[in-house]
Amino acid sequence: MSTTTPPLAGLRVLDLATLFAGPMAATLLGDFGAEVIKVEHPRRPDPSRGHGPAKHGVGLWWKVLGRNKRAITLDLSRPGGRAALLRLAATADVVIENFRPGTLERWELGWAELAAANPRLVLARVTAFGQFGPYAHRPGFGTLAEAMSGFAAITGEPDAPPTLPPFGLADSVAGLATAYAVLTALAARERTGAGQVVDMAIIEPILSVLGPHLTWYDQLGHVQERTGNRSANNAPRNTYRTADGHWVAVSTSAQSVAERVIRLVGRPELAEEPWFATGADRAAHADVLDQAVGSWIAARTRAEVVAAFEKAEAAVAPVQDVRDVLADPQYQALHTVITVDDPELGPLRMQNVLFRLSATPGAIRWAGRPHGADTEAVLTELGLTPAELRALRDEGAL
């Protein structure tokens, strides 16, 4: 572990959010040195603790999502919990929450109260539909954003139903966007001295990363349809089965790469066709190109295909499951997967921090902590006395 001071050291983040975009944003900040305090309900922990597989009763998703966070409990609907949260907010730089609009205000913990306690605070509000508009008060999850944004409509085979991703795609994209928004607000604070509110609607970031399909429709009336693994913009672009039963993915976004691929598979005459000169025209002849590339790949093992493509400087990648990812030499070289020593589960592997910084790298200091493990320590550091802690427990606020 690096001894260099991480770039976000000294930043204090209160993570009040659950499942999954808000907590992910806090995780990303914690990975680069922010002190993240995870605030959970005393009797209703973050649902991610029980989401997905568990080992010895310990949720594995939480171990990743809760890494680098100190875990405390506060019932924010009780007077003592509210008072403690305001005292914490007075010491913090960022609060991240994902309650339905109006919930914090009902507890007298809205922006007015938080800003009064700390005018430099950045409050990131992460909800399905944003803080206003006709859907603002609806319950929602990332799945709804994947449907509403157009992602599902363009994903899947042409003759099959729209396809949802088998993981929290919209939540993850919104988590990345929220971390970016928080850092942007903090940069603005350096100039103005004042905090502000970040309004993050999960339905928006996934729409932003879908590319120009809104503009295509606006300017050309084009409605993007499902094309399976093919692209309307270039070909060959697909997954192909190898002789040993594996799959590889081929992409030819660049014209030069398309020419190398088609020569590699022994069909150089196709590169001389007038339609081969543009990606869109190649896409219109995808059947011909898929047959040429697919038949060549089908006669060779995955290792032979990858080696030949690499020699030809053509773009290919094996379709890998998690076992392949862990064994992949490029991921190993990048240290993309790291082993973390955990008091509950022992050594466990997870994804490393999102990117590498040459001078001030991030680090995973610990995996997700038990529910409320740091409550007494954090509140004692805040100045609460043993008598005050007992009072909070008696009230049910801890």
Image (tube, helix red, strand yellow):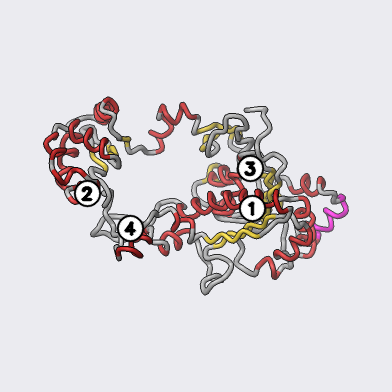
Few, some or many C-alpha atoms within 10 Å of disc 2 (few <14, some 14-19, many ≥20)?
Answer: many
- Real-space Cα separation, disc 4 to disc 1, in angstroms: 33 Å
- Real-space Cα separation, disc 2 to disc 3, in angstroms: 44 Å
Label disc, if present, on residue 185 of the rendered structure: 1
Q: Indicate which disc, 1 or 2, sits on the residue closer to the N terminus.
A: 1
- Real-space Cα separation, disc 4 to disc 2, in angstroms: 16 Å
Amino acid at the residue labelled 3: Gly
* Residue 290 placement: quadrant: top left
- Real-space Cα separation, disc 1 to disc 2, in angstroms: 43 Å
Tell me if residue 62 comes above or below residue 18 in the rendering.
Answer: above
Nearest to viewer (mark 4 / mark 2): 2
Q: How many marks?
A: 4
Q: Indicate which disc, 3 or 1, sits on the residue closer to the N terminus.
A: 3
Q: Indicate which disc, 4 or 3, sits on the residue closer to the N terminus.
A: 3
Q: Which residues are magenta?
A: 385-394
State yes or no: discs 1 and 2 in contact (Cβ < 8 Å): no
Q: Find disc 4 in the rendering and name its residue.
A: 154
Q: Quadrant of the N terminus?
A: top right
Q: Quadrant of the C terminus?
A: bottom right
Q: Find disc 3 in the rendering and name its residue.
A: 30
Percent position of residue 133, x then y: 54, 72
Label disc, if present, on residue 283 of the rendered structure: 2
Amino acid at the residue labelled 1: Ala
Q: Is residue 160 left or right of residue 167?
A: left
Percent position of residue 317, x then y: 32, 35
State yes or no: discs 4 and 2 in contact (Cβ < 8 Å): no
Nearest to viewer (mark 2 / mark 3): 2
